[in-house]
Every structure is written in C-alpha cells, then in structure tokens.
Image (spheres, rainbow, N blue to C red):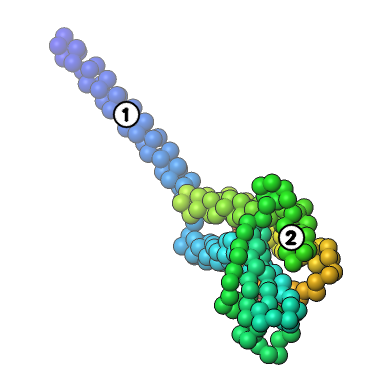
C-alpha cells in the first residue's frame, strides 16, 4: 500500500522534472533564436568603422557650417580708397545676423589696392545686430538699404540646415549605440538636405547683396564674398558627400564589389 502510494509521487515528480526540462529546453531554444536574431542585426567591425568614418566627414561639415553661420564675414563692402579725400576710409562687412563698419587708415592699405580694405586691418569698428529680426526695420549701410525679405530667407535656410544636421547626428548616434541600421537612410536624407539648404542660403544671401548694391548708386562700392561664405560653401559640399556615403552604406550590397564583379564577367 505504502509502495503504491509513493510510486505515483515519484513518477509525478519525474514528470514534473521532465516537463520543466522540456520547458527549459524550449526557453533555451527560444533564447538561442532570439540571440541569433540579435546577432543578425549586429554590425560588423568593418561596417561600424565605415559608418564612423562617414560620420567624421559629416561632423567636419557641421563644424564648418557653424563657423560660417556664426561669423559676420560673409561679404565685405569697401568705398574707394580716396573717396573722402582724407587719411581714413571706411569698409563694412556683415553676415546673416549682424554687420560691422570699420574706419581704416589709408596709409595701412596696399598702394596697389584701389578700394578700402581688407576688413581685417587695424581700425575702429562698430558692430550691431540687424533690426529686421526684432523690429522689422531694414539696415542702412553706406546709404544703401538691405532687402530684409532676402536676408531673413537666407537666415531661415541656415537655421533649417542646422536643424537637419542635428537630426542626422541623432540618427547616427542611435545607430552606433543601438546597432540598428535602419537609421542610415534617415541620416543620409538629413545630411544631404542640410548641405543643399546651406548652398541655397548662400545663393539667397548673394541676391540680397546685389539688392543692397542696387538700392542706391550715389556711393560706389566694391564688394566681395569673404571667408565665411567659403566655410559655408565647403560645408555644404562636405555634408552632401557625407549623406551620399551614408546612403551607400545603407544599401544591401556593395556597389563597388558589384561593379568589379561585372567587369570580371565581361573580361
């Protein structure tokens, strides 16, 4: 009787242990499958290195954009050197946000130069932020009036470009931290669009400079785009290049290897 009573308990315990083992095996197999699934999405070291290299290229473009947008040496305007028949002459330079006028000594200017400048020579300087961002008033530079609509459009395009750069950088940061390659295409779109917006901002700004010069012809001025525009233009090209690199890395195949395979087949 006692043997009959204890035997089923042993069998039940064995069955429970077997069931637990089977459940553990299923859990282990599911865990292995999950691990395999995670391994499938994990980037290789070479892929991660390529993404970091493309991100470094984009960061260079972002740095140049911030440098160009934040400085006021987009264009230099200079009066003729002997316009006022005095020992001094005036020059001006401005960017997207503020403008500066400088009074230079004629003796410090290159004798072969007909206009006043360059603006980096020592002299008295007076810088003010443009009022069309606050009160909507146009700025007057050497009796010439700015076109606030074009200036505002150039500034807005630059701000939109910076916003797209931030979004692209966030996508790449999440990609490198989470290992999800889905963020490559959004990042490429953000960086390409930011580069295009920077170049459009330069074009609109140049149109605003031409509108400024045509507003009054009483004072002849020499104008030239300065180093801030060079930084912004280089940044636009670099950002577009970085976006194209991210787009190529997001493809399921390597275009370079595919071209080599086609050449081998033809040969």
Q: Quadrant of the N terminus?
A: top left
Q: Eyeballing the image, is 156 above or below 34?
A: below
The residue to which callout 2 is attached is 140
Residue 10 sits in quarter:
top left
Left or right of 24, for residue 92: right
Disc count in the image? 2
Image spot of residue 46 (x, y percent): 49, 65
Residue 34 appears in the figure: yes
Q: Earlier in the sequence, mark 2 or mark 1?
A: 1
Residue at horizontal 84 percent and vertical 70 percent from the top: 218
Q: Quadrant of residue 5?
A: top left
The front one of 170 and 142 is: 142
On the image, the x and y values in percent for residue 179 come to 49, 51
Residue under numbered circle 1: 20
Quadrant in which the C terminus appears = bottom right
The residue positioned 83% from the left and 65% from the top of the image is: 216
The residue at 73%/64% (across/down) is: 141
Residue 254, by quadrant, is: bottom right
């Amino acid at each position: 009787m006692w043997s009959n009573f204890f035997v089923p308990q042993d069998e039940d315990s064995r069955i429970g242990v077997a069931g637990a083992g089977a459940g553990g095996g299923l859990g282990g197999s599911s865990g292995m499958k999950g691990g395999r699934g995670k391994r499938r999405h994990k980037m290789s070291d070479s892929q991660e290195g390529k993404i970091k290299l493309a991100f470094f290229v984009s960061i260079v473009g972002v740095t140049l954009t911030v440098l160009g947008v934040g400085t006021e040496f987009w264009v230099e305007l200079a009066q003729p050197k002997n316009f006022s028949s005095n020992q001094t002459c005036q020059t001006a330079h401005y960017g997207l946000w503020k403008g500066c006028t400088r009074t230079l000594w004629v003796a410090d200017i290159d004798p072969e130069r007909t206009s006043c400048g360059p603006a980096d020579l020592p002299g008295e300087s007076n810088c003010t932020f443009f009022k069309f961002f606050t009160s909507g008033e146009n700025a007057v530079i050497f009796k010439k009036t700015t076109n606030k609509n074009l200036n505002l459009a150039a500034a807005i395009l630059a701000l939109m470009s910076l916003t797209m750069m931030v979004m692209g950088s966030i996508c790449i940061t999440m990609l490198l931290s989470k290992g999800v390659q889905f963020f490559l295409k959004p990042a490429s779109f953000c960086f390409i669009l930011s580069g295009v917006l920077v170049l459009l901002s330069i074009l609109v700004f140049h149109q605003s400079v031409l509108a400024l010069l045509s507003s009054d012809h009483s004072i002849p001025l020499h104008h030239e785009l300065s180093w801030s525009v060079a930084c912004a233009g280089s940044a636009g090209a670099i950002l577009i290049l970085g976006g194209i690199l991210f787009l190529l890395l997001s493809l399921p195949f390597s275009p370079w290897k595919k071209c080599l395979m086609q050449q081998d087949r033809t040969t």
